[in-house]
Amino acid sequence: MSNRIDLTQFEEITKGTWEVTEPEWPHYGVMHIAPCSATVRRYQNDGRSEESWYANAKAIAAVPELIAELKKMYEREDALVSAIKELCDSEDSTGCSGDLTVVSLDPMLKLYELTSE
């Protein structure tokens, strides 16, 4: 069972770097995130500070970068798991013996390459 977020649901998000634009009318509490046309509102009676309002807008603007990094991490995790399985399953050809004593360096070098990026 995987706890991964299904990243395919985000494939159609607006491409490019999202940026928070300074509010034209800060007293109205509306901040825009371009180019995705998102708006973050700040209501005076919600009890949140102006700093929180800006932080929320910046978090939303970071979504494309966060998704891209998460995708890279998932790919790296898959490669690492695959390399570990290959190492453990390779007792009869290359890799390690039944007690996990390394008898071939190839799978270990593959792991090293994946972890040194």
Image: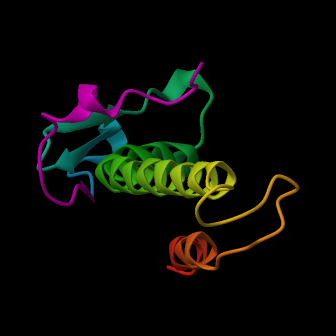
Q: Main secondary structure of the magenta part?
A: loop
Please report the residue visible at 63 percent of the width from the left and 74 percent of the height from the top: 108
Give the percent coordinates (x, y) of residue 83. 55, 58
Q: Is residue 12 above or below residue 78?
A: above
Q: Nearer the viewer, residue 47 or 7?
A: 7
Say if 40 sits above or below 85 in the image.
above
Position of 41 with respect to 25 (left or right) is right
Magenta span of residues:
1-21
Q: Quadrant of residue 20?
A: bottom left
Q: Position of residue 44 (x, y in %)?
A: 50, 28
Judge by depth and name the residue closer to the eye, 16 or 114.
114
User: Vertically, is 81 above or below 111?
Assistant: above
Quadrant of the image occupied by residue 68: bottom left
Q: Is 19 within the magenta?
A: yes
Does residue 14 appear to the left or right of 103 in the view shown? left
Residue 7 is one of the magenta-drawn residues? yes
Nearer the observer, 43 or 109: 109
Q: Quadrant of the N terminus?
A: top right
